[in-house]
Amino acid sequence: MLYRKMPKNGNELSILGFGCMRLPVKEEGTIDEERATQQVRYAIDHGVNYIDTAWPYHMGESEPFLGRALAGGYREKVKLATKLPSWLVESREDMDKFLNAQLERLNTDRIDYYLVHGLAGEVWDKLESLGVTNFLDKAKSDGRIINAGFSFHGSIEDFKRIVDAYPWIFCQIQYNFMDENHQAGTEGLKYAASKDLGIIIMEPLLGGNLASPVPSGVQEIWNEAEVKRTPAEWAFRWVWNHPEATVVLSGMNEESQIEENLKIADEAYPNSLTEAEIQLVSRVEQKYRQLMKIGCTGCQYCMPCPSGVDIPECFSIYNNLHMFGNTEGAKFTYAVRMSGAITNTEPGFASQCIQCGQCVEKCPQNLEIPDLLEAVVRELEGTDLEQRIAMIKQMFKKS
């Protein structure tokens, strides 16, 4: 296992972190606790020392599960990360209530790496007005949390101002070779690193989409490489090639995935890909782009929409559907993000479009946005949208 140093505190963290959002489950949907415990402990025994979870994962059962799985000496072997459920916070008192409950659920006296979960600009503004910086200061001073950070799902402009708003130790961003210009992206990665923040990477495989199934045209490009690697290894190595990335999280829930990821994490040094290999990954990214249905660059010129539609995000999820063919995954992601369940923002569904045409006038790509939003509605909303939203609200409710 290779390790990288957290800049501000010197912690040596495994470059592979175990993400506990997608643990193995039984037929009825509950965590397969025996198997998941074996997986987590096997990863720790083989060098993983960063474990990540959150309040809503597995309908609120991930934290209590880890409290049990890390018994028997395993808690002392890892840095444990969890997150303040920002969408549920309505007062300064709520922040302490959730943290104290998490300490109990995780059966620990401290959270090593505590994140304010799912920030975007409006969410941060609300939490800041409620006293979140005071909460973090107090929780650090009394030892309930050791290091403060945040996870992010917003614009690069908001990312930079949040980075500058508090003396964070670390941040967590979505990053992979398809997301260089999405959310924080490469610009955010480098900005956070310039401020000496440690950077935790989530979704290195874009929800598993970059691992399998792989379109034949993409696989043909991978096959050209002199050194043969699986698509998952290429995706991980591309992220780890960036020295700014401290830890890369994997929601691994198959023993074969854990074995493969551990092997890659033994070899993936920063700046170790050749220029030819970097260009190969770039060609794969371009091939995926060719499979897109909508030529949206995510420039945000169409925003804000007077009806509240999150146009770029609608198109991003729609393009992922057609690039990767994961219909259920795309519908779930669409319902989560457009409902505002994580970011505690107003809904941004494509069906909110009233065909006013303001976006068309602003779009530098000359996209017929209202017509394209109708296609998003047809393929990503459907008759079961309300059911999916209800399920998501159940997942993210107070427990």
Image (spheres, helix red, strand yellow):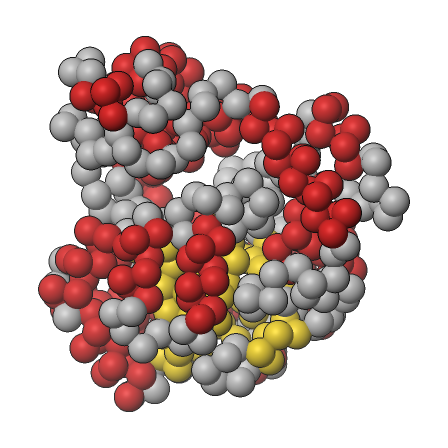
Instruction: Please indicate whether residue 67 sits to the left or right of residue 132 in the image.
Output: right
Residue drawn at (60%, 40%) of the image: 208
Q: Nearer the viewer, residue 273 or 66?
A: 273
Picture quarter containing residue 386? top left
Residue 219: name its quadrant.
top right
Res 84 seen here: no
- Which x, y percent locates residue 35? 65, 54
The relative height of residue 367 versus residue 278 in the rendered view (above or below) is above
Q: Residue at x 42, y 66 (%)?
A: 192
Residue pictured at 64% horizontal, 60% vertical = 240
Residue 170: x and y, percent?
Answer: 42, 71
Does residue 161 appear left or right of residue 326 in this picture? left
Q: Position of residue 249 (x, y in %)?
A: 56, 58
Q: Which quarter shows the C terminus?
A: bottom left
Q: Is residue 145 left or right of residue 207?
A: left
Q: Position of residue 27 (x, y in %)?
A: 57, 37
